[in-house]
Amino acid sequence: MSHVKFKRRHVPGRAGILALTGYFFRRSLLNIRQNLVINILAVITITLSFLIISLFLLVFVNLEGAGEIWSEKVQVTVYFDRELNDKEFAALKNVIMTLDGTDSISYVSKGEALKRFSARLKGQESLLNGVPQEVLPSSLEIRLKQPFRTSGGVEAYVTRLKKIPTIVEVQYGEEWVRRFNTFMNFMRFAGALLGGFIALAVLFIISNTIKITIYSRREEVELLELVGATRFFIRIPFLIEGMLQGLCGALLALLILAGVSWAFLNHAGDFLLFNPQQAGLVFIPVTFCAALVGGGILVGFIGSLTSLHRFVEQS
Amino acid sequence: MIQLHNVSVTYQQHICALNDVSLMIPRGDFVFLTGASGAGKSTLLKLLYAAITPSHGQIIIDNQNVSRLTRSELPYLRQTIGVVFQDFRLLPNRTVRENVAITLEVLGLGRKEIGERVNKILTQVGLEERMQATPCQLSGGEQQRVALARALVNEPKILLADEPTGNLDDENKSLILEILGEANCRGTTIVVASHDLRLVASSNRRSMMLDRGELREAHDESR
């Protein structure tokens, strides 16, 4: 006998794509309601997992912010072979501003230089008695743009700077810049490593939680197969449920963290030695929050898909 | 409608559940499969709705070879077959109405169409007052009728029922047989597995007896 393919049966009253989409969402919400306890447990697990990730991100973002503030101390000081008049200074400033990496320039006059030196000799200012005001040279302090605040960046910038004729000496605290960059690189590496481990652990926990919710409904999956549901029809509501679980978990985690963070920023000053708001502590940026929510939906989707793949294929 | 050619089923390579069974059930027929527990009745039904595959032989349903169906074609075969499982297989957290609607939902029907058909079938099986109840709130007979309604609601070409009257009182047995008879009158081919010989005898229908996996004899009570 020749093989005749079984095809989709013609049934009058079949719903259109929009109605079918509506059905899948309705069915998913109904499934959540009818399996409320296991769904709540899954959302709590996902929330706690995302709380760990978002807390880690919060700490990381603030450490990066602190690093950013410290990196502003990376600046280049330029000395000249002779005193410049206003016209020469303006011309030099224009030349330096055209150099790639220059953020801003400030002029330090001889008087300002002596004033700063005097401030550093706090309590021993008398040592400067009789010292003429012109003893210290005037200089230019150049702040660099963010990408140039690394050891390599500063060195390349200084090489270009030294080619300008009137400049005889350039100082930029090589050792400090090197140490600062080593510290920041170490922090980023440790953060990436720790973040990677946390993300893996969270993925494992969430995927297993979703697997348990699907396994608890294996009879439903088996029945659907026996009454003629296609794999697509069986999977879609579970995938929507997984995505909703991920979405709720990520949103709840961010809400809890935002609440705790707000309370800390506004009240930690009462019992800590510093005021967190003045220290520049911030919440996770909006783009990171959006990525976390998107990540929640994605993890829910992938968790459901892999669990269903194993379960539906094996049943 | 249904043809089995030298079909054998062996579990775990040495337990023979069916041995060289050949049979033919014409379209619109109403057949009882009888035999003691373990005779192979349920195995034969499982073969027909493709829950298991035969170790040997061919199964032809509606001129199509079931053994050659791919995984993606299988749902479309099952959509033409209604099955009443021995253990009912009702979903405990869904209402009677939702349990019956599943069969129509997998066909992709609209809400209105599903609502109308479910109401109609539940009225036919006498459960119109119990639509919002969950299976655990129903008696055994009522659960059996829900399972029957779920199998019949999409007007299948074939209905397979595994011990549909097991553990039921005489009144419920008669009711179930009556519902099956009505479906048969509407053109559905019906195969019922039952070990209740008294019921089979009283039904005046064709019967086939299985004994330790072999088809022993066939009676045509209706002739």
Image (tube, helix red, strand yellow):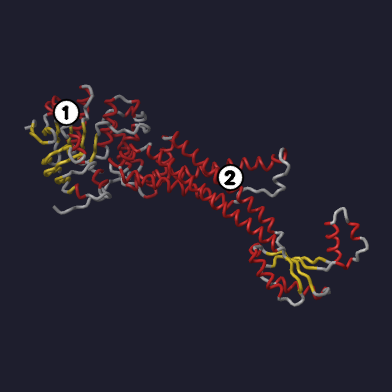
Q: Nearer the viewer, residue A159 or A259?
A: A159
Horizontal relation, residue A160 to residue A255: left or right: right
Q: Residue furthest left?
A: B223
Tag 1 subunit: B
Q: Residue furthest bottom?
A: A165
**Mark 2 or 1, closer to the camera:** 2
Tag 2 subunit: A
Q: List x then y, in percent, for residue A81.
A: 80, 75
Q: Where is residue A90, by image quadrant?
A: bottom right
Q: Residue at x 28, y 46 (%)?
A: A12
Q: Quadrant of the N terminus of chain B?
A: top left
User: Helix, strand or loop at disc 1?
Assistant: loop
Q: Quadrant of the C terminus of chain B?
A: top left
Q: Are marks 2 and 1 in contact (CB under 8 Å)?
A: no
Q: Nearer the viewer, residue A75 or A4?
A: A75
Q: List x then y, in percent, for residue A112.
A: 84, 63
- For label 1, the residue is B195
Q: Where is residue A151, by image quadrant?
A: bottom right
Which amino acid is tagged 2?
Leu
Horizontal relation, residue B98 to residue A121: left or right: left
Label 2: few (<14), some (14–19) or many (≥20) C-alpha neighbours in 10 Å = some
Label 1: few (<14), some (14–19) or many (≥20) C-alpha neighbours in 10 Å = many
User: Helix, strand or loop at disc 2?
Assistant: helix
